[in-house]
């Protein structure tokens, strides 16, 4: 065979092999493209196995994010750059401020502290979450202790403390409600996924919010995700036993206010309510409104930009409204019939910070009072935060992101300010958030607990002892 024939045949074979590889590669790419498009169509149409693939992807992405973006406690949202070098009490007007002690929960660990007006720590409750858990806990792979903190706290007269516990960087992030003794010993733990807030009724029952991932379609609301965080209203006995658990998204869906679920943004379809406050409605507030009864619960639904009243006895959302607020927290029913809340983004047009606190009429929507900071003292907290209307008419405000607690008079004058001393990070230039705060009268404490406090100023101890029963 002539040599040029062999070369020609070899070249043709090589060319055929190259074309084969090219066509085969194109075939594989086409199959991948078809599989991708089919998966996308199945996911969009919610046909098996599309939703299951999407859920597995989201779960994997959440685990990856937790393992990478939240491997440093200072990289989450429990610490923020300190806005000022000052710490502790930076401003005090004894004549204008509400007398009492301030209980606050700090974001650096599972800790709560009781402060004097001058900022001295009079008592501290601290117990690492890892020491609270038993082997039978329902919480799967909780975050390490540096990522776990007290989100809210309620102090009993005997010095025992009720706390909401959250894990930063987890999904779900709600962990538990716990009761600690005055010496920080664990009295009981309800590990049902509690988050954000709690309130205690006159009869001692505890009202809280929990959440869990559910994986089913909510009929008539195709805009929501197939797997989503459902919020629950829970009622616990004083001993921490669950007495009632109500799914709130489903409650909204069957209420006259169901249209609110159609307003959920695409960002929040997996967490459509983000319920962040629960407060017991008192007799005076209820008497001002035909839609409310004493013992109802006022809730705040951040992702609906709404507040509403739930009646536990009938398991109904009996009233809801939206207003000129954005990303709100801590809706408080006031004795005068108004509602006080922290409007996280409502001051976005202000040069004094993006946040404000507003008091408004539930029936007319009219704003009766507002505080939005000042140029010298801006109010700026994108998440968390709360407020408390005090007996003297002042308002105690938690600016969570700034690690700050402030008290303002009705005319907006700043009469007391505390900046969290907890600092961290590589340069010690980050401040731990203040998760919650409450001003309390020593007269509400029992003598045994009061005697433990190193109080000496303002005659508060003696006055309280004289008015307390043994």
Image: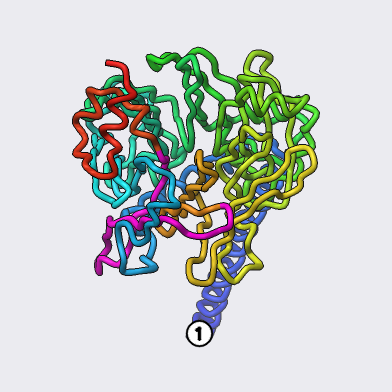
Q: Is residue 362 magenta?
A: no
The image position of residue 131, as x and y in percent, is 22, 31
Q: Residues within 10 Å of mark 1 (few under 14, many from 20)?
A: few
Res 222 visible? no
- Colour scheme in use: rainbow
| Camera-side residue of 74 and 156 | 156
Q: Is residue 430 magenta?
A: yes
Residue at image coords 39%, 25%: 191
Residue at image coords 24%, 49%: 120
The image position of residue 229, as x and y in percent, is 56, 35
Q: Which residue is mark 1?
A: 2
Q: Residue furthest bottom?
A: 4
Name the side, left or right, on which 240 lies relative to 48. left
Residues shaded magenta:
410-439
Residue at image coords 50%, 57%: 381
Asked which quadrant contains residue 250, the reply is top right
Asked which quadrant contains residue 297, the reply is top right
SS at badge 1: loop
In this view, 201 is above or below 98: above
The image position of residue 176, as x and y in percent, is 39, 29
Residue at image coords 78%, 37%: 363
Asked which quadrant contains residue 240, the reply is top left
| Camera-side residue of 326 and 211 | 326
| Camera-side residue of 203 and 253 | 203
Report how many numbered discs are placed on residues in the image: 1
Res 429 visible? yes
The image position of residue 432, as x and y in percent, is 34, 55
Q: Quadrant of the C terminus?
A: top left
Name the side, left or right, on which 254 lies relative to 59. right
């Amino acid at each position: 065979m002539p040599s040029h024939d062999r070369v020609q045949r070899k070249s043709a074979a090589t060319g055929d092999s190259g074309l084969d590889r090219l066509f085969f590669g194109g075939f594989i790419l086409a199959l991948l493209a078809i599989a991708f498009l089919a998966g996308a169509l199945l996911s969009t149409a919610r046909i098996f196995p599309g939703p299951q693939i999407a859920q597995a992807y989201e779960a994997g992405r959440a685990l990856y994010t937790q393992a990478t973006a939240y491997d440093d406690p200072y990289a989450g949202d429990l610490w923020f750059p300190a806005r000022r070098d000052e710490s502790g009490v930076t401003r005090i007007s004894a004549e204008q401020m509400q007398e009492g002690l301030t209980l606050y929960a700090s974001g650096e660990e599972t800790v709560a502290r009781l402060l004097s007006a001058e900022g001295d720590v009079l008592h501290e409750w601290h117990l690492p979450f890892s020491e609270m858990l038993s082997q039978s806990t329902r919480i799967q792979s909780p975050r390490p202790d540096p990522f776990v903190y007290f989100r809210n706290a309620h102090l009993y007269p005997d010095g025992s403390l009720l706390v909401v516990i959250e894990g930063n960087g987890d999904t779900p992030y709600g962990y538990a409600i716990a009761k600690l003794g005055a010496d920080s010993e664990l009295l009981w733990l309800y590990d049902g996924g509690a988050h954000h807030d709690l309130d205690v009724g006159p009869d001692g029952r505890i009202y809280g919010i929990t959440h869990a991932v559910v994986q089913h379609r909510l009929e008539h609301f195709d805009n929501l995700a197939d797997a989503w965080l459902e919020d629950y209203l829970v009622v616990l006995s004083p001993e921490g036993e669950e007495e009632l658990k109500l799914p709130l998204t489903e409650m909204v869906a069957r209420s006259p206010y169901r249209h609110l679920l159609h307003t959920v943004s695409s960002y929040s379809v997996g967490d459509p309510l983000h319920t962040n406050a629960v407060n017991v409605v008192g007799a005076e507030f209820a008497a001002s409104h035909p839609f409310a009864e004493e013992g109802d619960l006022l809730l705040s639904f951040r992702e609906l930009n709404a507040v509403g009243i739930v009646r536990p006895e009938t398991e109904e959302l009996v009233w809801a409204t939206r207003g000129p607020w954005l990303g709100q927290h801590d809706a408080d029913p006031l004795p005068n019939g108004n509602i006080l809340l922290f409007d996280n983004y409502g001051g976005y047009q202000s040069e004094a910070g993006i946040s404000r606190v507003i008091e408004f009429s539930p029936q007319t929507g009219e704003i009766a009072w507002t505080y939005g900071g000042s140029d010298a003292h801006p109010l700026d907290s994108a998440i968390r935060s709360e407020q408390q209307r005090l007996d003297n008419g002042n308002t105690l405000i938690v600016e969570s992101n700034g690690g700050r607690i402030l008290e303002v008079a009705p005319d907006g004058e700043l009469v007391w300010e505390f900046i969290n001393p907890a600092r961290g990070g590589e340069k010690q230039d980050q401040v731990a958030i203040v998760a919650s705060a409450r001003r309390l009268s020593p007269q509400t404490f029992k003598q045994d607990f009061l005697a433990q406090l190193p109080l000496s100023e303002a005659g508060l101890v003696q006055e309280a002892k004289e008015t307390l029963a043994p």
